[in-house]
């Protein structure tokens, strides 16, 4: 079982192999699953889209088709997540952890939503895990659907286009970049994780300051 999971993760994070094997259709399918289903929280959305852009620059796929279809899949996936949250409501927060659902990820997206409000629908696109759990959080919070849809359409197109066009630009200007694609993927993964790292460090810093402020002031010694 453990070996099977290791093989699965190796397959999923071999984004170059995935694109070579499944092309635009597989890219769109993964984007939909990552944004629409809880099981998709570990999928490599950012690195997959950037790599797909690199391959489009090399002529392996049509750029326009990739941009349009992947954007639509990102939007439709979020719509599914929103309505799951709208129907399930607060029951999601009492659901037990499973292989495909982690309550801590839902709570992280909830805190993100509380901090940024409606803009979360756009900002969360660029934060792994949060982008998977943000739609059901927005649905559970009963965010007005028209407002959510507007944010979602803009966010979906902005996320997909920025990632794919970044890869396309790199593929157009950097010679033989496909031979160095693992470095591109490493940079994209680091940048996508950076907001979470910064947030965690800020959270620790705030907790430390609160803990320090709650301590009684030291009294000077009486002589």
Image (spheres, rainbow, N blue to C red):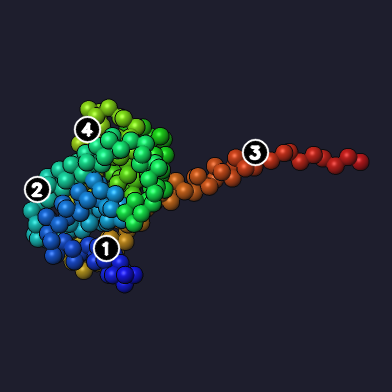
Quarter of the image holding residue 6?
Answer: bottom left
**Which residue is most to the bottom?**
3
Task: Quickly name the residue at label 4.
Answer: 149
Q: CA distance from mark 2 to mark 4?
A: 23 Å
Q: Which class describes the residues within 10 Å of circle 1: few (<14), some (14-19), or many (20+)?
A: some
Q: Quadrant of the N terminus?
A: bottom left
Above or below: residue 141 compared with residue 98 = above
Above or below: residue 1 compared with residue 107 = below
Rendered location of residue 79, percent (x, y): 21, 39
Q: Does dot 1 land on a helix, a strand or a loop?
A: loop
32 horizontally vs 191: left or right: left
Quarter of the image holding residue 175?
Answer: bottom left
Badge 2 vs badge 1, beta-carbon distance below 8 Å: no
> What residue do we see at 34% from left, 51% from top?
101
Q: Quadrant of the C terminus?
A: top right
Task: Quickly name the residue at label 3.
Answer: 213
Q: Which class describes the residues within 10 Å of circle 2: few (<14), some (14-19), or many (20+)?
A: few
Task: Quickly name the residue at label 2.
Answer: 64
Badge 2 vs badge 4, beta-carbon distance below 8 Å: no
Camera-nearest label, 2 or 1: 1
Which of pointers 2 and 1 lies earlier in the amino acid sequence? 1
In front here: 43 or 86? 86
> What residue do we see at 15% from left, 57% from top?
26
Q: Does dot 3 land on a helix, a strand or a loop?
A: helix
Above or below: residue 191 compared with residue 142 = below
Rendered location of residue 13, percent (x, y): 27, 63
Which of pointers 2 and 4 lies earlier in the amino acid sequence? 2
Q: CA distance from mark 4 to mark 1?
A: 30 Å
Which mark is on residue 13? 1
Which of pointers 4 and 1 lies earlier in the amino acid sequence? 1
């Amino acid at each position: 079982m453990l070996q099977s999971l290791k093989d699965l993760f190796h397959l999923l994070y071999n984004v170059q192999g995935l694109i070579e094997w499944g092309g635009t259709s597989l890219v769109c399918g993964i984007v939909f699953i990552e944004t629409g289903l809880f099981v998709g929280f570990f999928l490599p959305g950012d690195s997959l889209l950037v790599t797909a852009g690199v391959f489009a620059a090399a002529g392996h796929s049509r750029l326009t088709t990739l941009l349009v279809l992947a954007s639509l899949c990102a939007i439709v996936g979020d719509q599914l997540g929103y309505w799951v949250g709208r129907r399930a409501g607060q029951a999601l927060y009492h659901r037990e952890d499973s292989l495909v659902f982690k309550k801590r990820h839902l709570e992280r997206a909830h805190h993100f939503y509380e901090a940024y409000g409606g803009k979360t629908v756009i900002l969360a696109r660029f934060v792994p895990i949060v982008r998977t759990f943000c739609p059901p959080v927005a649905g559970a919070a009963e965010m007005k659907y028209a407002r959510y849809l507007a944010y979602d359409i803009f966010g979906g197109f902005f996320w997909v286009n920025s990632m794919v066009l970044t890869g396309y630009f790199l593929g157009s200007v950097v010679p033989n970049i496909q031979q160095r694609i693992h470095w591109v993927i490493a940079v994209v993964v680091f940048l996508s994780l950076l907001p979470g790292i910064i947030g965690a460090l800020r959270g620790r810093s705030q907790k430390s300051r609160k803990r320090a402020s709650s301590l009684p002031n030291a009294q000077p010694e009486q002589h």
